[in-house]
Image (tube, rainbow, N blue to C red):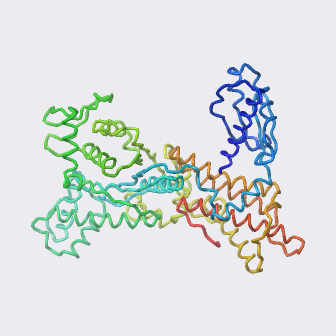
Amino acid sequence: MSLRHEILRITTAAFETAQREGSLPAGEIGEIGIERPQNPEHGDYACNTPLRLARVMRMDPFRIAEIVSSHFCTDGAVANVSAVRPGFINMSMSPQWLAGRIPGILASSGGTVTSEIRGGGRVQVEYVSGNPTGPLHVGHIRGAVYGSALANVLRETGYDVQTEYYINDYGNQAEQFAASLHACYLQLFGQDAEVPEDGYHGSYIKDLAVEIKKEVGAEYLDGGTEEIGAMGMRRMLSSITHDLKSLGIEFDNWYSELSLHTSGKYSKVIQLLDDGAFLEDRDGARWFKASELGEDKDNVVVRSNGSPTYFASDIAYHYDKFTEGGYDRVIDIWGADHHGHVPRIKAGIEAVGIAPEKLEILITQIVTLKRDGELVRVSKRTGEMITLEEVVNEVGSDACRFLFLMRSLDSQMDFDLELAKQQTVENPVYYVQYAHARIASILRLAAERDIDYSTGEVSLLIHPAESALIKKMLQLPELLELMGRNLAPHHLPHYSMDLATSFHTFYQQCRVVSSDPLDKEITAARLKLVEAAKLVLSKCLGLMIVSAPEEM
């Protein structure tokens, strides 16, 4: 059980006992508010419910707090309780109770980090989904890191999670990609072919053309734009897969937009919209009447030339997620330029019978790269966009993942390339990994000295620094629940830094491995604490897909 749930249980019991004994008026107490005081001197947890109940019970909130405080059981998790004006109940944890949680952590390999949310249902997390018409760039890193960490958090809190990458391999952009690549291919044979003005002009297109020429020779000099495009798409997807693996990311499923059209699923959804009277022919095109569902304006789903818009494909794609995939929730992570698309896609799925609240869309804000305080705009190598591959190669996957995860998606962020490479405590990821490596070195020292700490008595762990470390470890379950509920994995790096700080403080104040025979028992107890800290910190790093080094 998480600390918060245990405190909530004890506090609820105190209110119920006070009412049962007649010290407080009968009636519905409602939700009991538990929070952590900003000032540690006020205790570990505080309850503000007396303030809310004052009017209902027609009592002074401080008097309510006094009465409830007197009914607390203080022989368990809570050691001290006090009423504080104007109507708070402050609680401090029992060091003995905290120490007693260590065997549970060890027995389940960090089991206390397992949240109490179970059976949350089937959830799909779709993220990155960059068009396979070019390499992933630095802007994709944020969604990639956030989405993969979020999927891990949801799994940890009991959800059945599938991750998906949506491949935009159909429509105008795919056609422009094919035309651009074919033009570059023809140029390699001396032909006067021009890349379309609104096509793709990056150096990677020329590199692809060279690769394709090596493979097929002159086979497509007299046509074959579609075939050339398909070959280029396959290569781009292979490159994208490789880049994502460098960040520790592998998707459960890759979904082709083209398959929506070849399978008939797109046509089925258009028919559903037509049958529901949500389509209207206007100005030679077909319009989705979003205004009938409360939106500001209608949107084109089929252009005047008969080709579908991306909006139409998106409705079909999301319809298929829910009907064929059978998901209870779908979470999409989109780039900042898609913000305006959110309300219309929700209206679109509502029109085909899907409850719009089942779809949750997170929007990533812009990332700015900096080096020595200066803005980095283009790649040193190509003078074009900065790719995901370049950033990972320069600073490493761990720094990318940890630092990109430190800010919520709805805030813009600066990514300092030089800070990310520093091997000092100024670099957050280095600071946390160093804590894990230090813990590992302590356990290796114990092994070298043949110290058997299996019978260590954890009741000896009552030093304030020991209690603080245990409390920090026991906070992870409630944090996981918060992150799962709010879709907010960006708390993970901050928690891991706090946990590392708690460990470093403990290490400075409490000698772990002592050669003094008189310290044998406390050494064994502290080694158990150190091993538990290693398990929890490793668990936290694992959720972020950041390595937990044994030495540095």
The residue shown at (83%, 57%) is 463
The one of 401 and 71 positioned closer to us in this rendering: 71
Q: Is residue 286 above or below residue 545?
A: above
Check the picture and name the quadrant holding the C terminus. Answer: bottom right
Residue 547 seen from this side: yes
Residue closest to the eye, 538 or 155: 155
Residue 244 in which image quadrant: bottom left
Residue shown at 74% from the left, 30% from the top: 20
Residue 380 coordinates in the image, percent (x, y): 43, 63
Q: Is residue 334 visible?
A: no
Q: Residue at x 66, y 65 (%)?
A: 107
Nearer to me, 530 or 268 = 268
Of residues 75 and 277, the one nearer the viewer is 75
Estimate the x, y position of residue 116 in percent, counting from the top left: 58, 50
* Residue at the farthest left position: 222
Query: How many marks on residues?
Result: 0
Spot occupied by residue 283 in the image (x, y as percentages of width and height): 14, 32
At which x and y percent is residue 399? 55, 61
Q: Residue at x 77, y 30 (%)?
A: 21
